[in-house]
Amino acid sequence: MAEPAQHLGGRSATAAPAAIELTGISKAFGPVQANKDIDLRVERGTIHGIIGENGAGKSTLMSILYGFYKPDSGTIEVNGQPLSITDSMTAIRAGIGMVFQHFKLVQNFTVLENIILGAEDGRLLRPALAKARGVLRRLAEEYQLNVDPDERIEELSVGHQQRVEILKALYRQADILILDEPTGVLTPAEADHLFRILEGLKAEGKTIILITHKLREIMEITDNVSVMRRGEMVASVRTAETSPEELAELMVGRKVLLNVEKGPASPGAPVLEVRGLKMVDDEGVERLRGIDFDIRAGEILGIAGVSGNGQTQLLELLGGYPEKGSTVSGTIHMNGEPLDVTGTRSDARTRRKRGIGHVPEDRQTEGLIMDFTAWENIAFGYHDKPEYQRGWLMDNDAIRRDAQKYMEDFDCRPRNCHLAARNFSGGNQQKLVVAREIERNPDLLLIGQPTRGVDIGAIEFIHKRIVELRDAGKAILLVSVELDEILSLSDRIAVMFDGRIMGERLPSETTTGELGLLMAGITDTDRHDPAEGIPPEHQYVETTPEERV
């Protein structure tokens, strides 16, 4: 394994105090050693990346720093002062704020109400709201975090919800901001906007700790990066003196392929044929507006688009659980036979029996029951298989054997099928869902955001399995907000905007710039000045294949 380019030194006698200094931090959960003798120094006024595989202990370490967990041993210093962080309020008072991978917002509250929640500043709510409104306006302008304070969270895009989380931390006067996988639910353009915000915070003297598995982000935005593997800190280096390949090897302990290796597709007969598919939700909003496409055996059709343009509704409809109260029309044929889109036989069970597997976009709300064990989750949707029956009873031993095998094949950690799903990291939760669906060998795999919140080693593995499924003659519908993933995996790309397919492209004959314009609703026929009038969050910067890490 390659040695790191340069280790960051410890504190010298004359060095200024670090924003954060962790020494000998250890934390175990029963037999699982999540953190082992961790040393970490984060310089003030820098952006410090922390990377590692799923289950490497990154989030546990940051949860200790934010007061969610108490370390078994070790010390914490904040701005040169020893501090015992017993709870999150202690961390907040010390100037530490945290933006979690899964946002902690009350959906039916307004932005303003969420900002002051837990920091009301007195018994009377109205004066607190008035004061907060003024502070919020100043913070939003200063850091380009503009959101409507009176808009409800449920009405905001994911990118704007994240801005609210950052504003919450700044409102509480955070000088040290921890972001856990902040771009996992953002489009590439939204991520670029977030990076501009982080650069602005850094320029104001804030310290940023960025937990991510995306090497492009590390190389683009951080000053220093620390690498964790299996609960230990294996390297801390200056970002300018390392490379994506070196960091990937440090994370995984072996060389990792950063680009998808696949040969040309050999498409066969049509597996899925969709014509004139329309869907109107229970509020009368047309979510799908006449969708037409085919997917053949042995090919991957990628759907690109900014979140909220109908991709979710398309996946759910094809998977057999459209939004309640919605009205659907159009036709779907699977292997030449019609699929019911409006009646009682349009459910997910019927879809599975017809050979459709489905990895939903949101693993926690649609793919898993978080309080149930891994082996129980492995059986969901397939519990009526003959091999899982023992007379009138379920053959739980057979399910557990399969679950253990799937977890070994997909390198789920920890490899314990008796643990509840919530006890696995987000990436390992994703592996459970992907394993369940791919191992059933479907004729058509619907897969939404397959590598959201997944580390580089697992991304490589999941991509390989998707390509293997394609090469075995299966059809795959891939939905992802990661343009790099769409370009690397897809044999054809369809772009969705406002419930319509704006056009199809071959990956070898398009660019991120062209796809970005289609994602903004701009076609060849109506573009004059390609950048004019396009909101910043919809603009894309051209990249080369070498830059798509």
Image (cartoon, grey):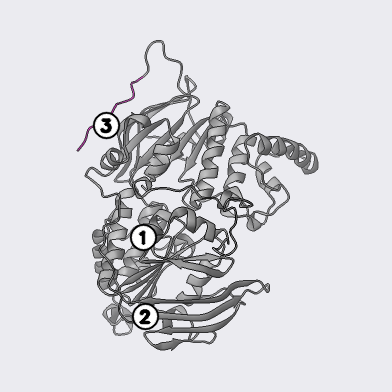
Q: Which mark is residue 4?
A: 3
Disc 2 is placed on an element classified as strand
**At which x and y percent is residue 204?**
58, 27
Q: Residue furthest left?
A: 1
Say if residue 39 shows up in the picture: no
Q: The disc labelled 2 sits on which kind of residue?
A: Val
Q: Residue furthest top?
A: 14
Q: Nearer the viewer, mark 2 or mark 1?
A: 1
Q: Nearer the viewer, mark 1 or mark 3?
A: 1
- Asked whether, in this view, residue 16 is left or right of residue 472, the answer is right
Q: Give the mark nearest the N terminus, 1 or 3.
A: 3
Q: Is residue 5 magenta?
A: yes
Magenta-drawn segment? 1-10
Name the residue tied to disc 1: 508
The quarter of the displayed image where residue 436 is located: bottom left
Label 1 to label 3: alpha-carbon separation:
35 Å
The quarter of the displayed image where residue 359 is located: bottom left
Residue at (57, 35) in percent of width and height: 89
Say if residue 165 shows up in the picture: yes
